[in-house]
């Protein structure tokens, strides 16, 4: 059973998706949930099926006190590195919240202070706290939808299925067709021989 939140007061949970991808943005979400939230299915997005994630999205968005999603794109990822891009995406999502959180909890072990709001990094937080789990679901869905749109333009890379992750098929397509403007050139795009 996931905890509602880490502290008392208005608390935002934040998480990102797409950190290990070879193409597309890194996407983050920030979510503030009410204390009496009822979403029994909600869990770390990696533990849910795609169908479950899509079923949860409208429920999270309806029941949340505030939520926001932000992308940081491949050119900036190449410029500032994936860790800084992930943190920047979380900051952008937090900035867009309609309510100002009093505390922020972040999935993982690295974060930078945002607007002098106290925060806590929680390793595997998406499997411990509902607000981080909700952020993990929204970040994953919004990023997956973005990659499906890109797939219409570049179907040969299989992004509809692999979402830009380094699958065998994706790497084979890079070998065969080269890279697109959406690929992260600072990443090792082809497997070492």
Image (cartoon, helix red, strand yellow):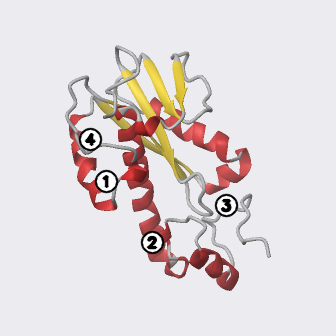
Relative side of 32 to 125, left or right = left
Nearer the camera: disc 3 or disc 2: 2
Mark 2 highlights which residue?
161
- Residue 145 image offset from top left, x and y in percent: 39, 61
Mark 1 highlights which residue?
53
Residue 11 appears in which quarter of the rendering? top left
Q: Residue at x 42, y 31 (%)?
A: 13
- Residue 92 image offset from top left, x and y in percent: 51, 36
Seen in the picture, residue 157 relative to 126 is either above or below; the reply is below
Separation (CA) of disc 1 from disc 2: 15 Å
Contact flag, marks 1 and 2 (Cβ < 8 Å): no
The earlier-in-sequence mark between 4 and 3 is: 4
Mark 4 highlights which residue?
61
Contact flag, marks 1 and 3 (Cβ < 8 Å): no
Disc 2 element: helix
Disc 4 element: helix
Residue 80 appears in which quarter of the rendering? top right
Seen in the picture, residue 28 relative to 105 is either above or below; the reply is below
Relative side of 108 to 190, left or right = left
Mark 3 highlights which residue?
184
Contact flag, marks 4 and 2 (Cβ < 8 Å): no
Q: Nearer the viewer, residue 169 or 63?
A: 169
Seen in the picture, residue 145 relative to 120 is either above or below; the reply is below
The earlier-in-sequence mark between 1 and 4 is: 1
């Amino acid at each position: 059973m996931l905890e509602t939140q880490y502290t008392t007061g208005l608390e935002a949970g934040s998480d990102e998706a797409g950190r290990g991808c070879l193409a597309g943005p890194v996407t983050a979400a920030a979510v503030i949930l009410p204390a009496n939230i009822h979403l029994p299915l909600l869990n770390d997005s990696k533990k849910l099926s795609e169908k479950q994630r899509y079923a949860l999205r409208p429920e999270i968005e309806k029941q949340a006190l505030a939520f926001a999603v932000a992308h940081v794109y491949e050119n900036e990822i190449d410029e500032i590195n994936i860790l800084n891009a992930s943190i920047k995406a979380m900051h952008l999502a937090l900035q867009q919240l309609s309510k100002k959180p009093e505390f922020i909890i972040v999935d993982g072990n690295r974060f930078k202070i945002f607007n002098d709001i106290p925060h806590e990094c929680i390793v595997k937080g998406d499997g411990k706290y509902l607000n981080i789990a909700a952020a993990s679901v929204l970040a994953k869905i919004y990023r997956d939808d973005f990659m499906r749109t890109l797939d219409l333009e570049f179907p040969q890379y299989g992004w509809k299925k692999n979402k830009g992750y380094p699958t065998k098929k994706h790497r084979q397509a890079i070998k065969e067709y080269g890279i697109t403007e959406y690929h992260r050139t600072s990443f090792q795009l082809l497997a070492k021989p």
